[in-house]
Image (spheres, rainbow, N blue to C red):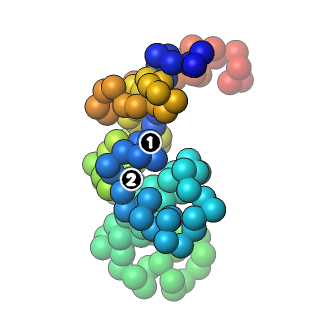
Amino acid sequence: DLAEGIYGAKPIVDWYDPAAAKVREYCKKYWPQYWENADFLGHWKFTLVVLECFRQAIQNAGWEALYTGPKEERWKAMEYEGIQKVKGYDPEGLCGPIDYTDPKDHRGSKFIKIVQAQGGVFKAVSDWIECPLIEYEKLAPELFK
C-alpha cells in the first residue's frame, strides 16, 4: 500500500506484459518454479540478443569463421561481424531496440519504460524512452585516472 502510485524505470517489460506471453507459456509448461521470476524473463531476452549476434556473425563472416582457426580470430569474427553489426534488433518486444553499432556506446538497449505501482504491480505508463549516454569520465574525471 505504501508504494501505490510511485514511479520507476524498467529496461525490460513486466512479466504480464503482452510481449512476455511466449515466455509465460514456456515457463508455465517447463519451469513453473520460476513463475514471475524477473531473472527468467531477463535471461530469455538476453538469449534472444545472443542468438541475433550469432545470426549476424554467420551472415557476415560465415560459419567457418566462428569454428575454425585460432581462438582470437574466431572471437574477432564474433565481435566485429556479429555483435557490432546488431542494429535496431527487437527481442520480441521484451525491451527497446538493441544496437551495438556505436563505437562509443555499448549499452545495447538504450531504452526504458516509466512504470507506476498500481494495485500491487508495476504497470508501464509510457512507451520505450531512449536514455542519453552518461559519460561518467567527463562528469568526474578524477575517478577515471
Give the position of the C terminus as an image quadrant: top right
Q: Quadrant of residue 104?
A: top left
Percent coordinates x, y for residue 86 in the rendering: 34, 55
The residue at which mark 2 appears reads as: 20
The residue at which mark 1 appears reads as: 14
Residue drawn at the location 31% of the way across and 33% of the way down: 128
Note whether 1 is above or below 79 in the view shown: above
Report whether residue 14 is seen. yes
Q: Residues within 10 Å of mark 1 (few under 14, many from 20)?
A: many
Note whether 2 is above or below 37 in the view shown: above
122 left or right, relative to 140:
left
Percent coordinates x, y for residue 95 in the rendering: 38, 44
Give the position of the N terminus as an image quadrant: top right
Percent coordinates x, y for residue 144 in the rendering: 68, 24
Q: Quadrant of residue 33?
A: bottom right
Residue drawn at the location 45% of the way across and 55% of the way down: 45
**The label number, if any, that marks residue 53 in the structure image:** none
Secondary structure of residue under mark 2:
helix
Q: Amino acid at mark 1?
A: Asp
Residue drawn at the location 41% of the way across and 42% of the way down: 13
CB contact under 8 Å: marks 1 and 2: yes
125 left or right, relative to 49:
left
- First reached walking from the N terminus: tag 1 or tag 2: 1
Secondary structure of residue under mark 1:
loop
